[in-house]
Image (spheres, helix red, strand yellow):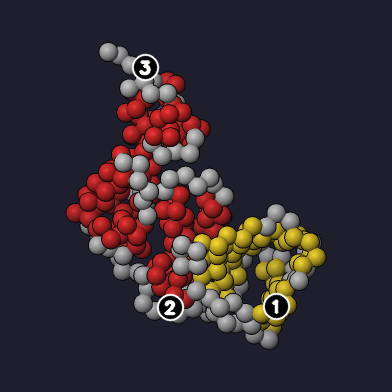
């Protein structure tokens, strides 16, 4: 199969319907004829990929998506020495569960241009999240990143349609209360738990939260954790301790979020008593 493979990573998310993510960095790589049990959605970042598919040879330069439907036979090769791409593998059942869609039409085109590079960016963000330290609520962030990549791709290239999210004022209020309590108790928060709490589907919850607050559920978690750290810092708790108590994986992560929220670092706090 491979001549040389460098710096590639393969993530298997057993807890998220078995979704898998490949960060591919290949040198002189070829794949024999095969098919995937589920959808294979990728974005070419560097080099050129190639398929023999449906009786035709297709080349995929940077900025091109690779959209394979389940059980479609193809081979894989690259006419360039280096090939880099990000790809997500998801069964039909996983896509139904994550996006809350009853009907999937599949992808009519195998190698469309990625308009505005939105799917490429979403897949890159997902890879970035997967490579970050697994802090408290890391899984929530991964769930949202997987959802966003799949939603973008199926809406833009697979003719999927979502019900428009409403304001959901009572659900959002309850969501914020649940998040606040979990942050105070240092509990892990999953998208499933939040969706069950407010009795909305996970996909609809993400979209409704964005509409109401401009943030995702994970964004609200970060906000609550940063505010908790702020209260601790005002009590003269050292920044390293405040970071851990607020669910950040280290002091540097707290400082980045604190600067985004308050415009200064924790060291700039002046207490007037």
Taking the image as drawn, is residue 131 in sight?
A: yes
Residue placed most toward the observer, 153 or 273: 273
**Residue sitting at x 46%, y 67%:** 17
Q: Judging from the image, what secondary structure is the residue with disc 3 in?
A: loop
Residue pointed to by mark 2:
104
Taking the image as drawn, is residue 148 in sight?
A: no
The quadrant in which the N terminus is found is bottom right
Task: First in sequence, mark 1 or 3: give its number.
Answer: 1
**In this picture, is 256 found above or below 102?**
above
Q: CA distance from mark 1 to mark 2?
A: 24 Å
**In this picture, is 178 found above or below 149?**
above
What is the x, y in percent for residue 50?
71, 72
What is the x, y in percent for residue 210?
34, 53
Residue pointed to by mark 3:
270
Which numbered marker is on residue 59?
none
**In this picture, is 11 found above or below 155?**
above
The quadrant in which the C terminus is found is top left
State yes or no: discs 1 and 3 in contact (Cβ < 8 Å): no
Residue pointed to by mark 1:
75
Viewed as shown, does residue 121 lie left or right of 264? right
């Amino acid at each position: 199969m491979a001549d040389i493979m460098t710096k590639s990573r393969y993530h298997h998310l057993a807890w998220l319907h078995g979704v898998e993510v490949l960060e591919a960095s290949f040198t002189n790589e070829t794949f024999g004829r095969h098919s995937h049990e589920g959808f294979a959605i990728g974005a070419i970042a560097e080099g050129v990929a190639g398929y023999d598919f449906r009786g035709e040879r297709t080349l995929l330069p940077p900025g091109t998506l690779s959209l394979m439907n389940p059980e479609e036979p193809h081979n894989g090769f690259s006419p360039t020495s280096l090939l880099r791409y990000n790809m997500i593998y998801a069964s039909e059942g996983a896509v139904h569960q994550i996006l809350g869609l009853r009907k999937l039409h599949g992808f009519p085109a195998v190698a469309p241009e990625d308009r505005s590079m939105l799917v490429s960016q979403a897949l890159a963000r997902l890879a970035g999240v997967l490579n970050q330290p697994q802090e408290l609520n890391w899984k929530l962030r991964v769930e949202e990143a997987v959802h966003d990549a799949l939603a973008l791709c199926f809406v833009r290239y697979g003719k999927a349609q979502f019900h428009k999210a409403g304001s959901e004022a009572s659900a959002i209020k309850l969501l914020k209360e649940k998040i606040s309590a979990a942050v105070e108790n240092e509990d892990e928060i999953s998208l499933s738990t939040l969706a069950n709490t407010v009795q909305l589907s996970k996909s609809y919850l993400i979209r409704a939260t964005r509409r109401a607050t401009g943030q995702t559920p994970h964004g609200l978690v970060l906000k609550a954790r940063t505010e908790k750290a702020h209260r601790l810092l005002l009590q003269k708790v050292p920044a390293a301790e405040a970071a851990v108590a607020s669910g950040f994986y280290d002091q540097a992560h707290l400082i980045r979020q604190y600067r985004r929220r308050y415009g200064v670092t924790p060291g700039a706090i002046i207490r007037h008593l």
